[in-house]
Amino acid sequence: MFSLEGRGKAGLRTLRTAWFALGFAIACGMMQLIPAFQSPDEIVHLLRADMVAHGQPLLKGQEPGVQDRTGGWVDIHFFQFSQWMQKIVGPHRDTSLSPTWLMSEATRFDWMDDEVFVNAAATGYYAPFIYLPHALGLKLSRELDLSMGHSYQLTRMLVTLLVFGLVFWAWQIGRPSLLVQALVLMPMALFQIISPTIDGLCFALALLVLSLFLQQWQEGKATRWQAFAFYGAIFLLVTSRTNLIPIVLLPMVLLLRHRSWQRLAATATLLAASAGWTLYGMIHTQDGRVVRALSTGQIIGAYLREPVEFLRLVGRTIADPFQGHLIVSSFVGNLGWADAPIPRFALATIGCGLLLAALLTVAATRYQKADLAIRATLVLAALGSAMLAFFALAVTWNPYPVRVIEGLQGRYFIIPAMLLAAALGPVRLAPVESPPLPVHRAFVLLYAMFCLGVLATTLQGRYGMGAAVFDF
């Protein structure tokens, strides 16, 4: 019996490995349809990663001794590469420039080994650790003396490979609910996963946290590596996506359920480190992109004194025809810099797919009173993270007072949606060798094929990159 079970688990692990290898191969193919720096905020994220690769983990001033921490030093050619690609971004892009030609030209330029100071204040709230995979790719590219175009491609592949590895690890611990899978397969989520920003990493880290949380809730224990990954992943999420601070509820309720001195020390360390970086980022970040009469601290105080008015502001933002539609479309599939929307029929079809996935998830879930606490924790973390996304943009990107909150993108709500989806689904992990329901398997296959098709046709229509651009 034991040997049969072992062979079953080994066979399932081999099958999953094959599926994820196929997925990574498809991801590498999809990458060829996207020119460099076409994901929202990708430019500033990769410039920050190059600062980390240069040994600058924290932002600094341009002159020695200057206290305004606004940016850092990056390679001149890498900065120029990002500026070339920005010319094909947005509604005012230069339509005379071919993305294929720009990427081809990028292979003609090497690292300059001379630096220019670049403002990256938008990343000042983020801890440098989330940029380590990107920095490794850029550092390795420099050591291999690759061109700008090839350096970008290598970095994108390394970051995406790490994302797939984290997802594979999470899947080995426990298969996520059907609704969680449907959220990760949306064109917007897939686009971010194959782009070298921090979003794809955050999606994968959230999946890993959910799997480890459900496992520890059920079993009350974890290996040393699992415990390190659980608390480390939460720290990375909280310090790179401020609205995800409510996710610290997960280790706190685990502490209440499974008390131990080790868990207490780990949770206290996590809370202290997360709070410390958050305060550091708020105090030392000077973002001059938005000129306002009030400081961030003053706006925070104003909304805290009038919480009902803030809730009305959230309601007006969701109900606003432009902002509300932007949030929904960029949640599912407004790709690029919100300048490559998927067709309306595809948006509606994927919306129906998400609804069907939710119904199938609920139908396959056995709800018990004993699971009320874990479901309530996930719901609170989801709602808190969603509300903090509104709050963070209101106090850092918008003046006060304001009629609606501008700058919100639907991708900010993908991880909160994953938390809510986990609360709706099974919270008791099934044995690793148990197969999914046939209807679930069929749904995932058809839904994934549709989303990949929509992603490919939208990217091809927007950028016209055609087949592979690079020859390695």
Image (spheres, rainbow, N blue to C red):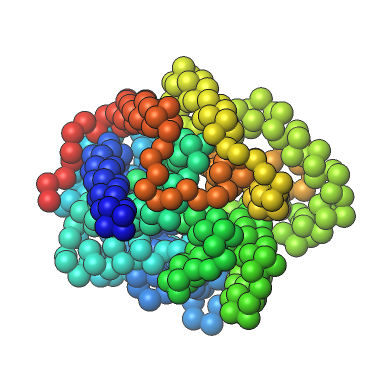
Residue closest to the eye, 84 or 171: 171
What percent of the width, then of the height, locates residue 162? 34, 57
Q: In this view, does 457 lie to the left or right of 373?
A: left
Q: Residue at x 70, y 28 (%)?
A: 320
Residue located 63% across and 81% down the image: 261
Which quarter of the figure has residue 3? Answer: bottom left
Q: In which quarter of the image is residue 457?
A: top left
In this view of the protein, can residue 198 be seen by the observer? no
Count of numbered labels shown in the rendering: 0
Give coordinates of residue 110: x percent, y percent. 19, 60
Q: Which residue is drawn at 34% across and 45% down?
A: 194
Judging depth in this view, the residue of 76 and 4 nearest the camera is: 4
In this rendering, position of residue 210 left or right of residue 159? right
Query: Image check: 107 left or right of 351?
Result: left
Q: Is residue 233 left or right of residue 197?
A: right
Res. 430 in view: yes
From this view, report whether residue 1 is shown above or below residue 65: above
- Residue at the spot 49% in from the left edge and 76% down from the top edge: 63
Classify the position of the N terminus by image quarter: bottom left
On the image, the x and y values in percent for residue 9 come to 31, 53
Camera-nearest residue between 208 and 200 = 208
The residue at the far front in this view is 1
Q: Is 39 situated above or below 465?
A: below
Q: Which residue lies furthest to the top in this view?
A: 345
